[in-house]
Amino acid sequence: MHRPIIGVTGMVSSTVNGLRYAGTAAAAAVLDAVLRAGGEPRILYPGGDPSSESHWAGLDGLIIPGGSDINPRLYGQEPGDDLTLTDADFQDSYDLEIVREAMRRDIPTLAICRGMQLVNVACGGDLIQHLATGLDHVGTVHQVSIERGSILHTALGSQQVDVSSYHHQAIGRLGTGVVATAYAPDGTIEALQTQAPRLLAVQWHPEDRAHSDPVDQGLFDWLVAQCRADLQRKDGSHRAVTLADVMPAGPQPDPDAPLIAVVVPLSFPGFTAEMFELVQRFTASTLAALNEAGARISIIDPNDPQTRSLDSITRADAVLYLGGGDVDPTVYGGSLGTVQGSYGIDRDADVFSILGITDTLQRGAPLLAVCRGSQLLNVALGGTLIPDLVPGHLHRGEPGEPMFLDEDVRLENGSVIHRILGRCGVTVRSGHHQAVDRLGDGLRAVGFAQDGVVEATELEADQWVLGLQWHPEDPDGNHDDFAAIIREFVSQAAAFQDSGHPAPRVEEHIDV
């Protein structure tokens, strides 16, 4: 798969050093940030026609960077003082048209500073031509508060960030379908999202510090990850698993039973027929066990931007994370280019899952994390992963062999999982090539493979949190062990519900 091609709209300049004529420029800091994220930047000349197919040929994503002020007449105002308009009359009209086309085509887009203002104007909003607040927004660093559950929150994984600011204009009246998702301390709007699900707009300049600040670089990582997922989806991936494929038949639990949020990727980039069969079997096995144990079920697909919801996690009495594709190494300080045999990477799904784990830990709710889930639990607490186990024959079948195999694991005496299963030596079903490396804060390792790889973790604090690297839900594994784990998990969820933190009663047992 080629590196995603990211179009960067250029700014026409009447004078360019080394040229005898006007030129088109883009900030090198923006282009460098795209390269670091794994993309390939391509500067777009604003004299082109964004409505033509040829203008988008080969492009996977778009960045609309900062630049000169937008002519106020384009949003129904007369120009005031202190404006620096573009050098080319066609610049504004081109930029507005490419915003509208990107939204219409659902092109992954990052709009920066002027770019964010263009988004609002393109949707019928207007601007404050010159800010007059007590907070200086030109050449400063200030704090920004981000709305929970917004695209920006998912992309960065934080609700408070410090940003590099360089603007004297701001969003005024919001355009149709435009939502403000971040604010400066003086109330200035600092981020927007629209009805286009993959357009992210920020007022600050993340390129200023992206070379040294992972948060700022994270916006470019988010964009390239969106484009990479598109490319992987175009490779003929199998259809996603549906609820009809996995929901248990028969009577449903009592409406006052504890509610378990099951976070499971029902599809991911590069989803094959083999992966479909595994996800369908393992998810169906899990849901049947939960149903048998008397729990209500809420299914959340972290890979589906249309359905994932932090609120669905927050209202649950306990949360269960199942397996899926690899964890994006950039969320634990690694690099995509260094991971061999990686598959199914979706950074947004990882960040969303980490936010959900953090929420669950803060609420004190029970949490069971399986395979990929146990890895995300470790990352959520500041730990790292082994991105590719070498040798890995103890943990996963060799090429040409079945992926899942039996593996012997030693459990620490007195640990949560030891008390559930009643023995220190267990044979488990394993099929992973990544694993816990440096333990996250507050986690302890309580299960080990023969080669020392961590196979089980629990929280040192007095909260029921269990991470299992193996797949107890594999129908080819020990059914009694899995049933025991699920019964204890549901019992913990019921205790949490009874402790005064109940999930609200809902009419439907499925939440997607």
Image (cartoon, grey):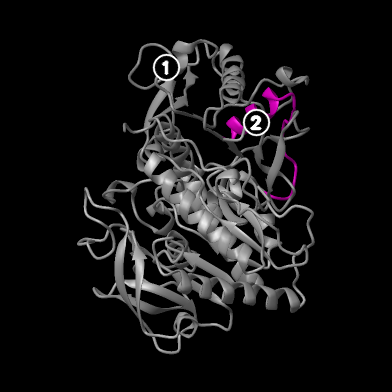
The residue located at (58%, 58%) in the rendering is: 262
Q: Is residue 363 left or right of residue 270?
A: right
Q: Which residue is mark 1?
A: 57
Q: Which residue is mark 2?
A: 117
Q: Residue furthest bottom?
A: 414
Question: Looking at the picture, does residue 348 appear above or below residue 442?
Answer: above
Residue 432 in picture, x, y percent from top left: 33, 59
Element type at mark 2: helix
* Quarter occupied by residue 429: bottom left
Q: Which residues are magenta?
A: 112-135
Q: Earlier in the sequence, mark 2 or mark 1?
A: 1
The residue located at (32%, 19%) in the rendering is: 18
In-front residue for pair 479/440: 479
Residue 10 in picture, x, y percent from top left: 47, 23
The residue located at (35%, 38%) in the rendering is: 35
Q: Quadrant of the N terminus?
A: top left
Element type at mark 1: loop
The local crowd at label 1, few if under 14, some if 14 to 19, many if 20 or more residues have their Cα within 10 Å, is few
